[in-house]
Image: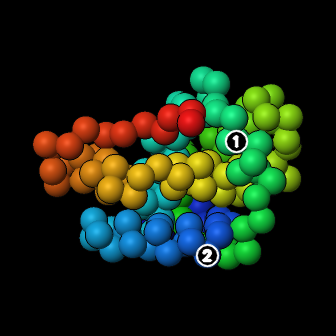
Amino acid sequence: METDEVMLAVRLTTQDRTLLRRLAHGHRGDVSEVVSDALLDVLPFVLTGGTPQLADELRRFAPCAVTVWLPPELAELLPALADRMTELSGVRPRTPCEALGAAVRLWLRQDPALLMAGLRTLHGADARHSHHHPVAA
């Protein structure tokens, strides 16, 4: 963790928290790194039109708070992400952290094997797999 990173709380379901930890462990990173990667992966998708599941993710009860550290450059994008989520879904995230949680939960809806392959590709561990982007299903 770098000293200039921003601490945030991300709300996830128990299942999402378990998957996030498994993904972090599987690519020998930490949860904060996976959340940063998830945000980088899902951000262009959400900003360019989102998915019908966006409103559902914003409304979903997520009882588990997970503390993560984001680079300030990513944390600064969260208010704009919240605004865009409101435009697309009609549901306003109450905080930038809530927008982050919805984005991460949306990202975690993908096949876990594809998520792991994407993380490996992103970090150069396995260039044989392509990085998968979220799809509207």
Which color mode does the image show? rainbow
Residue 73 at x, y percent in the picture: 54, 45
On screen, residue 103 above or below 6: above
Look at the image and tell me whether residue 4 can be seen. Answer: no
Q: Which mark is residue 54?
A: 1
Label 1 close to label 2 by CB (< 8 Å): no
**Pointer 2 residue:** 14
Badge 1 amino acid: Leu
Residue appearing at x 25%, y 38% in the figure:
130
Where residue 25 sits, quadrant-wise, is bottom left
The image shows a total of numbered marks equal to: 2
Q: Secondary structure at mark 1?
A: helix
Q: Residue furthest front?
A: 137
Residue appearing at x 24%, y 46% in the figure:
121
Badge 2 amino acid: Thr
Q: Secondary structure at mark 2?
A: helix
CA gap, disc 1 to disc 2? 19 Å
Please identify the quadrant where the C terminus is shown: top right
Dot 1, how many residues are within 10 Å of its Cα: few (below 14), some (14-19), or many (20+)? Answer: many
- Side (left or right) of 90 relative to 81: right
Residue 42 at x, y percent in the picture: 52, 40
Please identify the quadrant where the N terminus is shown: bottom left
Q: Nearer the viewer, residue 89 or 82?
A: 89
- Side (left or right) of 30 relative to 78: left
